[in-house]
Image (spheres, rainbow, N blue to C red):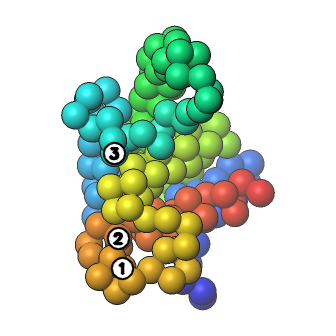
Amino acid sequence: MAGAARVVTRSGSGYTLHLGKDEREVVTRLLAELRTMQSDPDAAEATARLYPVVHPDRPDQEDEYQRLMRSELIESRSAGIDTAIEVLSRSGRKVTLSESELLAFTRAINSVRLVLGTILEVTEDDDLDAPPELTDSPEYQLYAYLSYILDASITALS
């Protein structure tokens, strides 16, 4: 998207999010779906990338880690989703964010992107050379748009 306006820019001591109403509604809906999915056992396969394996060679330790940490990860992610949704609900096409709000927004966007990528079975190679049957789908277009927002957020933060 070379030459396109940035979705997130620095502004004074904070950041500005430049998203229209329709884009905000779509992202808000995706974030709300993520909130539900992260606690849904039926969505475990789709959300697997949100809960990294820490002890791949020790299933007993991995089970214990997941038992101890999963609820904390869900709570932390939910707080980030709440922040992102609150930011997206602010009026005006341009919304000012603090650094902590942009960090929470960025983490929430990345989580949605990871789940969508898992559902689509996107690999790192697909980012450069994905087949048309994948890239032409509406779901992949959402994945690509979230990637664009994520990139703009990280660029603004750096």
Q: Residue at x 56, y 67 (%)?
A: 124
Q: Secondary structure at mark 2?
A: helix
Say which amino acid is labelled 1: Thr
In primary-sequence order, the first of circles 1 and 3 is: 3
Q: Secondary structure at mark 1?
A: helix
Q: Position of residue 57 (x, y in %)?
A: 61, 29
The mark closer to the camera, 2 or 3, is 3
Tell me if I can see residue 24 in this picture: no
Q: Which mark is residue 13?
A: none
Q: Residue at x 39, y 49 (%)?
A: 115
Say which amino acid is labelled 3: Ala
> Whole-Å distance between the Cαs marked 1 and 2?
5 Å
Q: Is residue 44 above or below residue 55?
A: below
Q: Is residue 22 above or below residue 90?
A: below
| 140 lies left or right of 96 | left
Q: Count how many numbered circles sit on residues in the image.
A: 3
Q: Is residue 111 above or below residue 68?
A: below
> Whole-Å distance between the Cαs marked 1 and 3?
19 Å
Where does the N terminus fall, quadrant-wise?
A: bottom right
Q: Residue beneath label 2, please?
A: 140
In primary-sequence order, the first of circles 1 and 2 is: 1
Q: Residue beneath label 3, please?
A: 46
Judge by depth and name the residue closer to the eye, 143 or 55: 55
Judge by depth and name the residue closer to the eye, 44 or 104: 44
Q: Residue beneath label 1, please?
A: 135
Q: Position of residue 9 (x, y in %)?
A: 64, 63
In primary-sequence order, the first of circles 2 and 3 is: 3
Marks 1/2 in contact by CB < 8 Å: the verdict is yes
